[in-house]
Image: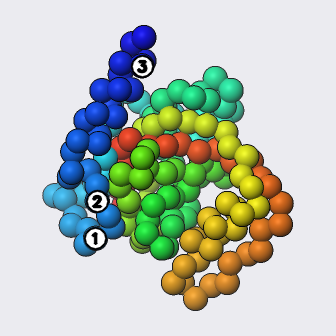
Amino acid sequence: MRMGLLLFLMFTVFTATDTLADQGGPTSQPADGIIRRGLPLSKKAPLSVAKVIAEAKKHAGNYVKVTGAVKSVCKKKGCWFVIKDPKSNEEIRITSLGYKFFVPKDCEGQTATVEGQFEVKTMSVAEGQHLEDDRVEGTGKKAKKVTKTSQEYRLASVGVELKK
């Protein structure tokens, strides 16, 4: 019951706040150097990407706070990005819960701390190709051909902080 109420309250605040809907426009650099999108993050310590993945069954469907290096970002809108663990190179794709905010399209290499609902997702060939096409949009690179379904780890984020 508490989790349902918490999710309802987070969703209500999230959808009612127009300032959260950053659509990838010009990014101003705050004085502390941290770019924030969505809701403020909790005070709990973030887990590593490797730890979340190692405990994927435990975390599936639950809210977690995780940190990692931004490996790639959607070049079309900044609507998703991938964080990786620096030691294991394991990855989690980050999206915005409800498509409420985007991140700068040039944030590769930054450290991201995100909080949201974790899931293990089987992607269709079509979805995999769509994400691959978005990854290279406007870069002059050619998208790889996706030929089979794949499993990936995802987090639907309610908030993100990016640091250089």
Q: Nearer the viewer, mark 3 or mark 2?
A: 3
Q: Which residue is mark 2?
A: 22
Task: Verify CB contact (< 8 Å) between mark 1 and mark 2.
Answer: yes
For marks 1 and 3, the one nearer the N-term is 3
| Residue 116 shows in the view | yes
Q: Which residue is mark 3?
A: 4
| Residue 85 shows in the view | no
Where does the N terminus fall, quadrant-wise?
top left
Which amino acid type corresponds to the residue marked 1 in the rendered image?
Gly
Q: Compare residues 11 and 84 and report the one nearer the observer.
A: 11
For marks 3 and 2, the one nearer the N-term is 3
Where does the C terminus fall, quadrant-wise?
bottom left
Across and down, in percent, residue 13 comes to: 25, 35
Q: Does residue 8 appear left or right of residue 63 in this picture?
A: left
Q: Nearer the viewer, mark 1 or mark 3?
A: 3
Q: Residue at x 69, y 68 (%)?
A: 129
Q: Which residue is mark 1?
A: 25
SS at circle 2: loop
SS at circle 1: loop
Across and down, in percent, residue 52 comes to: 60, 34
Which amino acid type corresponds to the residue marked 2 in the rendered image?
Asp
Q: Residue at x 31, y 47 (%)?
A: 38
Crowdedness near tag 2: few (<14), some (14–19) or many (≥20) residues, C-alpha within 10 Å: some
Q: Does residue 124 appear left or right of residue 58 in this picture?
A: right
Across and down, in percent, residue 55 comes to: 66, 28
For the image shown, how many numbered marks are present on the structure? 3
